[in-house]
Amino acid sequence: MMSGDTLALAMMAFAIILIMVGVPIAFALGGVAVVVALYEYGPPALNIFVLRIHTLFQDYILLAIPLFVFMGFVLERSGIATRMFDSLRQMLGRLPGGLAIATIATGTLFAAATGVVGASVVTLGLVALPAMLRYKYDKGLATGVVSASGTLGILIPPSILIIVYGPMAGLSVGQLFASVLVPGLLLSVAYTVYTIVLCTIKPSAGPTVPIEEDTLSWPAKLADFAVAALPTLLLIVAVLGSILLGVAAPTEAAAVGALVTVGLAAAYRKLDLRMLKEASLQTLEVTSMIYLVTIGASMFTGLFIRLGGGAMVAELFLDIGWSPIAILWLMIVIVIFLGMVLDWLGVLLLCIPLFTPVAAKLGFDPVWFATLMIVALQMSYLTPPFALALFYLRGVTPPDVTTHDMYRGAITFVLIQLAVLTLLIYVPAISLWLPRLLFK
């Protein structure tokens, strides 16, 4: 019989190998857990897995996942993003890189209303990318802005990632929402500043809309924006405000948000049975995937920690003799590297149960540490070769936009994300002042 530490290492290595060769993450993690449990403890060990699954399905917070996902898909199909982009294009088109700035603003608003990256990236790709390409924007800038703005949905509340992260790390989802809100908006501002500077220095990268096409007066532009965006802004304020102020739990706020979103779709005359059916089926698909992976990872990490793997990982980090900040950077690098080959859910469920106890022993604020991990996980959407956001975007880009253009554009925004992540590490107050204000 192998020792517990050796068996834990073996199951980690075998799970990673299975994932790398293409076995779905849920089956790789859950399958390895079942085999090792039977080897080490025999058939009675399977009862523990049943109890863990039962506990998982009883988690009230996780019920917010299908509600927020449904909310995102209804918004996507209601044409609200198209209306927002068109109104912002009218307002910002005369600025250097104005269409790209309008894309970032639309992506930020859409992220705050959905929490689903795939829907945001595809919607922006269909709405904003053709407009930028029509005005001869640099293809790298155009695709980079769309993919980076779309990934804000993983960071700006109501993020599905945060709803999964909170219960796993034993943290309040409301506190995490508050802690990532400012970093998410900071990233949006950083994207905008970069776009303005680039297009001012190099106007050909993001030409302004010709003056003859700027036909609306400013009162007309503001009225158009009010019709297009204010209902969504009110929805965002109602849902996030009720969570951040402690009026409603995330699940309750998600239920209200889903209902109001259906009402918005009806008000815009986009609501019909076909749209509801498609949004419901997509919600079922995404939610089932998240729950299936979470079940497999829960089985894996539970057994891994029981075998002593968690303590072994903690000792490994703490015994290398590095400073706490150096160890923090090591954990971030591991998350970013794994994000290049795995999706965010796989990285989250593999790393967070192991890294959170290490962070606690190093004396890091748990909310601050979680914020850093979430920002690092956001980078996984843009870092090749996996780069899920680019895969989503590839499905809606015209043939003359090459994969090289998309990678070229994404790398710049990955560097911006890394710069903001570095700022958050050395200035913790950026992410901590709001949760400390709201959750005293």
Image: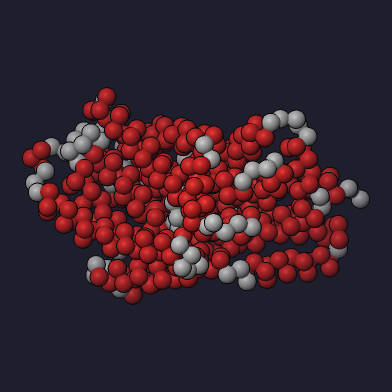
Residue 59: image quadrant is: bottom right
Q: Position of residue 306 (x, y in %)?
A: 80, 55
Picture quarter with the C terminus? bottom right
Residue extending furthest toward the top: 201
Q: Where is residue 103 in the image (x, y as percent from the top left)?
A: 30, 45
User: Against 142, is 28 above or below?
Assistant: below
User: Against 416, is 279 above or below?
Assistant: below
> Left of 73 or right of it: where is 16?
right
Residue 42: image quadrant is: bottom right
Residue 82: image quadrant is: bottom left
Q: Which residue is drawn at 24% across and 39% down?
A: 98
Q: Which residue is drawn at 21% across and 55% down?
A: 225
Residue extending furthest toward the right: 1
User: Against 32, is 335 above or below?
Assistant: above
Q: Residue at x 23, y 44 (%)?
A: 131
Q: Where is residue 302 in the image (x, y as percent from the top left)?
A: 74, 57
> Left of 209 or right of it: where is 304?
right
